[in-house]
Amino acid sequence: MSVSTRVDLALLGIRGRPPVSRTAGAGPSDDGHLMIDGRPAAIPLNPQSPFVFDGDKVLLDGEDSGLDVRVIDRPKFYDLRTLDGVSYEKIARLHGRNVLATTVVQTCIRYAEDQRCRFCSIEESLRSGATTAVKRPAELAEVAEAAVRLDGVEHMVMTTGTSAGTDRGARHLARCVKAVKAAVPGLPIQVQCEPPADLTVLTELREAGADAVGIHVESLDDDVRRRWMPGKATVPLSQYRDAWREAVRVFGRNQVSTYLLVGLGEDPDELIAGAGELIEMGVYPFVVPFRPHPGTLAVDVDGAGPPDSAIVEKVSREVANALQLARMAGADQKAGCAACGACGVLQSVGG
Ligand code: SF4
């Protein structure tokens, strides 16, 4: 498959709904998960796309697209329930082929309309009843054990909405990690949170058993940050840099990552240069195309569309080259989004 076809798929999405898919939530969502060319791919669901998933393969304009597609079956753990009757599916979800993902706190202090990230719909999945507000450590441990045993899950991502505390939600993440590690010691876990004001919390996360951490800035351009993420933009970039440095010290080089979104109106060359600085610090810049999906302010209010495919390809290729020079690969992260790679095309071009 050519890289440009993979980029087109990432941007145009597919019609139809694969057995593993998700609607609103934290981060990129509203997508279907398939194996494409042997790699996990999280592809936007788009009723206007020229690509159609027919339950088995991907067609382009009615013909077999020639893409090497493997369907990921609905996981067995989705059919189980906790003793309290909560469906496991509401507690954690399968992402890609082998990632268990959960949002441990499904609310965010930044969700007021004039504060929230315009691409995020973290509280919409809560409103629709698709998930629960706060995941308890014991129930996450129960679900993780079942997902490993029944569905061969190999790593786990725990993210959180931002809390009002100085730990930004990291202490609840640490409690969840500890419980999951007690139940399934061999399951690598990535945690994701905003830079905590008190950086010692990063050591608490590591000591609880977290293997990797994502501290997601989404853009290194302050104008873009103020426009797209007014709440998060109140945290200065210097605070992100301090947190990344401390996280690299605690978790190790290339076990720390951040999302960088392409398509928020930033200068692509500045984005590439910024990614280079992150790589120098030992932080993996997980470059992903901005994905417009309904339920977000970006789509419902701003009418934002996907980025230009040539820019996504250029940025992904150049960042992948820089990663290769630094001998940093997404696949070398022990767990999490950079290890999975399904939401971007960086791994398809060698990152
Ligand atoms: S990259 Fe992250 S959000 Fe995307 S499918 Fe993989 S684990 Fe999930």
Image (cartoon, helix red, strand yellow):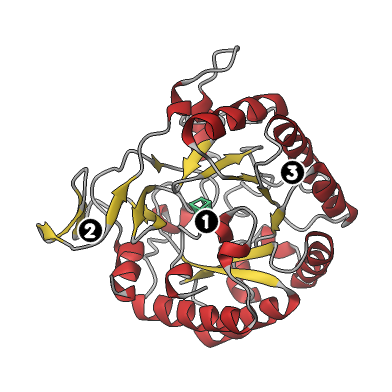
The answer to whether mark 3 is within 8 Å of ligand 1 is: no
Query: Looking at the image, is mark 1 or mark 3 earlier in the sequence?
Result: 3
Give the structural element (helix, strand or loop) at label 2: loop
With 238 as the anchor, is 98 left or right in this view? left
Q: Looking at the picture, which amino acid does disc 3 mark?
A: Ser
In the rendered structure, find residue 163 and report the number of the disc placed on it.
Answer: 3
Reading the image, the residue beneath label 2 is: 49
The CA distance from mark 1 to mark 2 is 24 Å
With 43 as the anchor, is 223 left or right in this view? right
Is 32 in front, or is 334?
A: 334
Query: Looking at the image, is mark 3 or mark 2 earlier in the sequence?
Result: 2
Residue farthest to the left, as pictured: 62
The CA distance from mark 3 to mark 2 is 37 Å
Rendered image quadrant of residue 319? bottom right
Is 77 in front, or is 313?
A: 77
Q: Looking at the picture, which amino acid does disc 2 mark?
A: Ser
Query: Does the image show residue 264?
Result: yes
Q: Looking at the picture, which amino acid does disc 1 mark?
A: Cys
Query: Does the image show residue 167?
Result: no
Dot 3 and dot 2 residues touching (CB under 8 Å) = no
Is 96 in front, or is 22?
A: 96
Please rate how many residues cluster around mark 1, counting C-alpha atoms within 10 Å: few if below 14, some from 14 to 19, many from 20.
many
**Badge nearest the viewer, 3 or 2:** 2
From the viewer's perspective, is residue 332 above or below residue 33?
Answer: below
Reading the image, the residue beneath label 1 is: 340
Dot 1 and dot 2 residues touching (CB under 8 Å) = no
The answer to whether mark 1 is within 8 Å of ligand 1 is: yes
Query: Looking at the image, is mark 1 or mark 2 earlier in the sequence?
Result: 2
Rendered image quadrant of residue 55? top left
Q: Quadrant of the N terminus?
A: bottom left
Rendered image quadrant of residue 59? bottom left
